[in-house]
Image: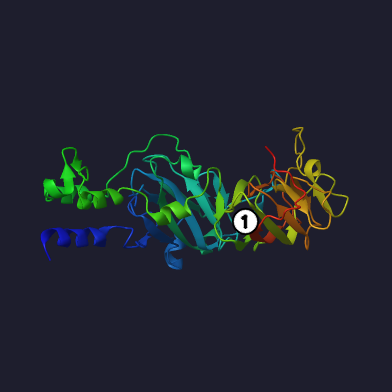
Amino acid sequence: MDFRQLLVAVLLAISPEFTPVRCQLACNANGLASRQKRLVVRSPASGDLAKLDSCQYRVAPWSGQVCQVRVDFERLELPQLQLNATSGLLECVDFLQLQRFRICGRNSGQHLYLPIRRGQELQLLFRLATPLGKQSTWQLTLTQLECPLDSSSLSIRQPEVIQPTVRPILPFLGNFLPRTIFSGQSGLGSGSGPAAQFIKTLTSPSMADLEMLAPLGCDQYFRTETGGIVSFNFAGGTYMPNMRYSICVRGTADSEISYKIDHFALSKANAEQSGPAYDTDCRSTVVTPLRVSDYLSIPNSYMVGQTNLQATYYCGNGLAGRELIGRPPFVLRFASDSQSSASETGFQLTYSVRRSSQDSPVTPEL
């Protein structure tokens, strides 16, 4: 094996595209930020957790092209919402804080996409304020996703121009690389030879990253043709107040999506009337104190067997067992107000993406 073959083999070995990294990050690890493409954070052992009032993790960007972090809640068991005696409202006392999201309760199997600006660290804060909080358990997988320089084709626009960054070890290796083979006058990877082109591939997002990137504004992104979606803390029985997030499903312009509702219980303005409610029953256009504003928005949708009903906002408790058909864009938006009750248990549905039928009664909004 000559020098070039040996060096290419070394580069393959250290490249994250060929070597998945699953580093385990310890709680409050000396206040240092971990810099890994993919890592796992786990709750401390019960004896250590009992001594903590909080548990914080800091994650540094893997490269200058990181634009999103996908957080998979493989296991997340925190205490449930508690009643604030002063305000009379339910709130998270023990929680996980992830950017604007404050999460408590049982959320294993959920995920979130978090946007990251150039050079921005991601911080995860577990607040353990009560004895129940010190019995929490979690295991989260964080995957840093890199955007291409020109991300317009992905419908993902960066807040600022991001320059490509060579993986941290490559500049060190560059001191030993023959410039006539691997580089041009501008430095490592700037030549036109095959090895230089290979070096350039290490500074670009992998195909796996491009596949996983969520469209702009999507807090959750489901990439399979079929799947299930549930509200946060559905297993715990009550969704969290003051929460707003967008749920996106991958599809094409010539497809439609079937949502089969297994469970649906959101508050509504006319609570004395049973059954489902729509639009102004769910989201008043006039802002008033303590207005009811819990809803699941499904744009460009209609109800199977009742095609004359083409609502956008859904709430109430009578949708279970019904099927909705939606057209692009495949974006669901969930919102909850500051008020909560035991009857606000959330939603559970399954979806299926399929070819659009010719006689769909929905006209896409412009």
Q: Name the residue rendered at 48%, 55% in the picture.
A: 71
Task: Quarter of the image for the C terminus: give it.
Answer: top right
Report if residue 54 is visible in the image: no
Q: x%, y% of residue 118?
A: 38, 39
Relative depth, front residue between 25 and 261: 261
Q: Is residue 303 left or right of residue 90?
A: right
Q: In what element is the residue under mark 1?
A: loop
The residue under the point 65% across, 44% down is: 242
Residue 17, percent from left and from top: 33, 58
Answer with left or right where residue 3 lies relative to residue 93: left
Q: Given the current orientation, which residue lies at the most extreme right position?
A: 273
Q: Is residue 68 above or below residue 353?
A: above
Position of residue 69 measured from the top left corner of the image (x, y, whole percent): 45, 50
Question: Which quarter of the figure is the N terminus placed in?
Answer: bottom left
Q: Nearer the viewer, residue 33 or 308?
A: 308
Residue 164 in the image, given as x and y percentages of width and height: 32, 42
Amino acid carrying label 1: it is Phe
Query: Which residue carries the number 1 mark?
Result: 232
Does residue 133 appear in the picture of this structure?
yes
Q: As rendered, which of 171 and 190 lies closer to the eye?
A: 190
